Image (tube, rainbow, N blue to C red):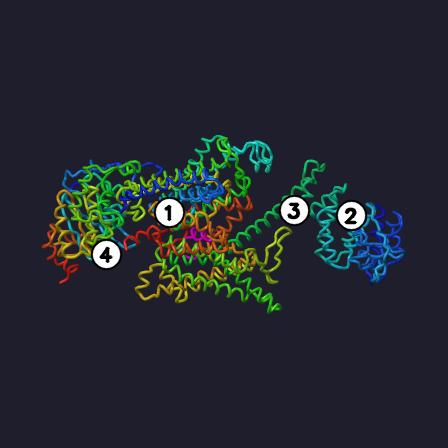
Amino acid sequence: MISRLYGPKAWIVLACCAAVVFVVFPVLNLVVPEGNPLHVTAFGVTLGGKIMCYMIVAVAMDLVWGYAGILSLGHGLFFALGGYAFGMYLMRQIHADGQYHVDMPDFMVFLDWKSFPWHWTWSEHFLWAVFLVVAVPGLLAFVFGYFAFRSRVKGVYFSIITQALTYAAMLLFFRNATGFGGNNGFTDFKRILEVPITTPQMRMALFTITGATLIATLLLGRFLVTSKFGRVLAAIRDAEARVMSCGYDTLWYKLFVWVLSAVLCGIAGALYVPQVGIINPSEMSPANSIEIAIWTAVGGRGTLVGPIIGTGLVNGAKSVFTVAWPEYWLYVLGLIFILVTLFLPDGVVGLAKRWRKA
Amino acid sequence: MLRWMLIALLIALCAPGAARALDAATVGKLATGDGDERAAAVAALVASGDPRALEVLKALSDGEMQTAGNRVLIVKDDKAVDAASGEAVTPLPESRDDVIVNNRLRGELDRAKAGLRLMSHDREVRRAAVKELEGGADDDMRPLVKQALAAETDPDIRASLALVSAQLDLKSTDKAARIAAVKLLAGSSSSAVKTTLIPLADKAEPDAEVRAQAKEALKLIESRLARAQMVGLAFSGVSLGSILLLAALGLAITYGLMGVINMAHGELIMIGAYTTYVVQNLFRAHAPGAFDWYLAMAVPASFCVSALVGMALERSVIRWLYGRPLETLLATWGISLMLIQGVRTIFGAQNVQVENPAFMSGGIEILADVVLPYSRIVIIGFAAVVLLGMGLMLARTRLGLFVRGVTQNRAMAACVGVPTARVDTWAFGLGSGLAGLAGCALSQIGNVGPDLGQSYIIDSFMVVVLGGVGQLAGTVYAALGLGFANKLLEDWSGAVLAKIAVLVFIIVFIQKRPQGMFALKGRAVES
Amino acid sequence: MAEPPAVIPERPRRWWLKRSTQPSSDASYGRTVDGALDLTHGVVLYLEGISVSFDGFRALNDLSLAIDAGELRCVIGPNGAGKTTMMDVITGKTRPDAGRAFFGQTIDLTKLSEAEIAHAGIGRKFQKPTIFERHSAFENLELAMKADKRVRRTLFAKLTGEERDRIAATLERVRLQASADRPAGLLSHGQKQWLEIGMLLMQEPRLLLLDEPVAGMSDEETERTAELFLSLAGEHSLVVVEHDMAFIARIARKVTVLHEGSVLAEGPLQAVQNDPRVVEVYLGR
């Protein structure tokens, strides 16, 4: 039942997860010394932060796909745009510590540019970067979504043109002339807010901020989904024409959740970049966006929690396979796609529900 | 100046004779004499009319001439040949001295070589020599050129020589000569000629009449060049369009029929290309004499292999997802990942070589700058044949009837006894087979690697989305339209921006007209 | 015969929403043109000389019909008579080639969009029930309820006591109180039909158009539906298209027979059933 989402047990689970993020990890990383088997390495912290960013994206994806029925295969674009927006700030924060020892990003010096392009104005200000992280994906989503939903483009056609959109953007960002570092992108970050980025404390700070954002996203999603808005949205997913004949202007409902989802992805991207340390146009590749869909599907769409589990499972498997048996990873991923769509339409969460009933 | 007229005279006088040994003394002077003696020796060799003279002079300027005692040798790859007689000298003498060429001699050598080549017996050598001069000839060459022109019998080379001569005449002080030269050059369509004419149309040219003539000549040349450009562009557009058509035809059929967007379509194309590669290798290994005919086997093989793979996919995965297009999209994406990795495991991750058969190499040269490759012409023809075949199949055969029926109204078709499940399998096989054919075609003009499919999948989608579903006409028009649009924009702003512009255009178009250009009446984007 | 109604000027719509067939934001506030429904002459629906052609085929041929306020009218006729097309014209799905259609005295139906007509107070129930299968009956009614349907309002909407009562009352009316919290997809066919009628009622329409409402229902369900309709008549006006003569006998006062796009006969059921033309064309001997 849609309106009864998450009983009291769920809050306990949430509290435990929060404890892991805010207490266990910091302790095991910063306090427990390195030789100790319980120690969580810097790599572990970064991996955890990265996966949590993906989880935010998966929840955002669930909002548009699981609840509104819009399958976007271009969500990676919003993620990447957020990453690039924050990346610009991070590049400025390198100051003159780059290869050429000028107060200008290395790639610009390499291209022999004498001044910053127009889209780099104010990029040295942290607040402007934060604004861009929210505004750029949001604006693009608004314009694209407005025209797409207005013309009633739905289903596979919509998915295909989101693919085309992210593909076109990827091609655009690969060009050096676009002013985003070309195919190398941004990397070699040194500082945020003048604080060095590679210290364990900064890494942990980013990790916990990401965790907090994930929890906030989850709560926001829950609020949305249990409200009347959520019920209307689910109705739009199931029978849009009927919703329209009830008198709702479905365009604005879809647009609202679409833009919200894009903004959440942008924020996730902005948190991702300083943790991973690099952003380049391959983040916008069509394949990435399709993978986001599979994280959501594996976990179980329309549940908010499912996508989080799905992301963890798939990315966990990826980490394991790419280290141990790299040639087999694509087989496994492909199989996951096929098996989940054939046998697990409700994902892992759905499976758990069935077991509980049995 | 005088010397060259002398040389020209000597050349004119000499008759092409049988190969005889060059005068040893002259050759000796060439190697060991002082500056003037050597220059005279060069002239003498030119005058001898001996075809070996060119060889000797070439060896000298290439630094291959050496002396061993009194003998003059041409040494290449540790093999010595007597310079004068041309006979081999074994064993290679131990002590040899290099023959040095200074700048003055080098200049004389170059001119002598050019002159000799212009007068060579070999038509191809003459043609190549003239071609070289077309880029811009030295004033010094003028008398040589004029002589060659007078003696030339081959009409093609004669025409080219005339143009070269005219280009030289442009610098003449005689106004009438200049005007005549300009008029002659107006008939050309080479951009090199255009460059030489430009200064004459400029204000710097003192004579008004010459300027006017030059301007007119330039206009004529430019229009000819523009036309050639356009033909080249149109051809590229049709060529790209035909490739897009081949790639997208299969997708259009499966989508129109089953509402399935097959993300593994690109991989079926790739499988077709790899099948062609395998067939090529088989022919190379077992029937090298018939290599040029490997395509005759590769085409049906690609079709069959891809069709079988497609049918296997349909039976095992896709039919269970009937009515769930979004899930089908994801499942087929998973299949594509597995197929790519499979090919990588079997054939390796790098590109493989597929060679064109002889009749597909080379091309038709329309103008100096515009060449229409045979391979692309063949592919255009191939695409047309495939299209025709498809059209006939859909219109005339039983399977085609069933396919059309099921596309329009599946439930009704099932009610009247059409075996819809089997039609699905066959139609999917057909679509996949078409993808295989596209792969075969692509192998002839591009690289074949595991990622081949990925580069064509988005384009295929765009064609299907743009052209609408249910009618072949839509696919054809969309493919050609996109091919043209891509090439036109490419010409204007570069390949990447062109692609982006086309994608953006489609995104916008789809919102104006969601059902595509030629959708069946009443059929919505979502059935 | 009712007087020919006057024409009211078209409401200006926001230009950037022009291409969309969505109602303008005004309408989705939940405000209807209720105030403008003029029933001074007692006629709620007035069709005069309506003609509609599809590719040469005449679906409606000079059709004239008038429904009184509070009436329960049945419309019968053979297939192809134009019953569904007539409903399409009334709801704005199809524009007539000729003729006039008025809701009350003043609302010109041929000038409004589908959504505007829905908001003006005409509700249509299609033959196939379209409800939200994954929502409960309660939620279905909540969604259909007449309210401010803009995004912002909906985000923070909380059901007031009064609204709950209204939903409960409707549930009772359509006899679904017991199934209020079960997913609507689990209801029987008949119950789904009632739920849809309930959703229609939540929009507080003045005129209900019902297309074959008892198709596929059991006898008991049909009887209950008849009771429901009878209870609705009076405060609502109903136009019911049906083939089930027993059901019509149960509910009808006045029956209109359509044939080949125009009205063949009209009157009490008895009279119509004995009309030789009707017998020949539809009822059979």
Q: Position of residue A25 (x, y in %)?
A: 42, 40
According to the picture, the residue beneath numbered tag 2 turns out to be: B142
Q: Compare residues C130 and B390 and report the one nearer the observer.
A: C130
Q: Quadrant of residue B313?
A: bottom left
Mark found first going from the N terminus, 2 or 3: 2
Q: Compare residues A68 and A207 and report the one nearer the observer.
A: A207
Tell me the kind of residue under disc 4: Gly
Q: Do the CB atoms of the residues marked 4 and 2 lie less than 8 Å apart? A: no
Tell me the kind of residue under disc 2: Arg
Tell me the kind of residue under disc 1: Pro
How dense is the environment of label 4, judged by Cα within 10 Å: few (below 14), some, or many (20 and up)? some
According to the picture, the residue beneath numbered tag 3 turns out to be: B191
State how far apart marks 1 and 3 are (Cα): 62 Å
Q: Position of residue C113 (x, y in %)?
A: 28, 42
Tell me the kind of residue under disc 3: Ser
According to the picture, the residue beneath numbered tag 1 turns out to be: A307
Q: Which mark is residue C80?
A: 4
Q: Magenta stretch: give its range.
A: B459-472
Q: Do the CB atoms of the residues marked 3 and 4 lie less than 8 Å apart? A: no
Q: Compare residues A177 and A152 and report the one nearer the observer.
A: A177
Secondary structure under tag 3 reads helix
Query: Is B466 colored magenta in this rendering?
Result: yes
